[in-house]
Amino acid sequence: MLATLRIIEIVIGVGILIMIHELGHFLAAKWAGVRVDKFALGMGPKIWAVQRGETEYSIRWIPGG
């Protein structure tokens, strides 16, 4: 049980680091005037999505970049 909890913590931690990294790419692109069609947290099928201006923001099933 403890090992399973530790694995979940690691997956969440790595997911947060990847999210921060990808957010940096997103913000740099917006700052430089580059069109960003989609920005997603995770990969795979969408859990939730919303369109704001030219960009579709979404949350996906598989944590990662």
Image (cartoon, rainbow, N blue to C red):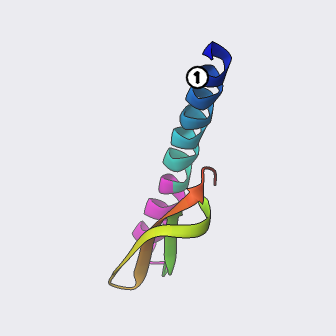
Q: Residue furthest left?
A: 52
* Quadrant in which residue 58 is drawn: bottom left
- Kindly identify the amino acid type of the residue bearing the numbered disc 1: Leu
Left or right of residue 45: residue 47 = left
Residue placed at 39% from the left, 85% from the top? 54
Instruction: Report the number of numbered marks.
Output: 1
Residue 61 position, x and y percent, is 57, 58
Residue 26 belongs to magenta span: yes
Determine whether the residue tagged by mark 1 lies in a helix, strand or loop: helix
Q: Nearest the camera: 22 or 43?
A: 43
Residue placed at 60% from the left, 70% from the top? 45
User: Relative to residue 62, is residue 16 depicted above or below?
Assistant: above
User: Relative to residue 13, is residue 56 depicted above or below?
Assistant: below
Mark 1 surroundings: few (<14), some (14-19) or many (≥20) residues within 10 A: few
Q: Quadrant of the N terminus?
A: top right
Residue placed at 61% from the left, 28% from the top? 10
Residue placed at 55% from the left, 55% from the top? 22
Q: Is residue 41 visible?
A: no
Write down the residue under mark 1: 5
Q: Nearest the camera: 35 or 46?
A: 46
What segment is highlighted magenta in the picture?
23-34
Q: Is residue 59 visible?
A: yes
Left or right of residue 45: residue 19 = left
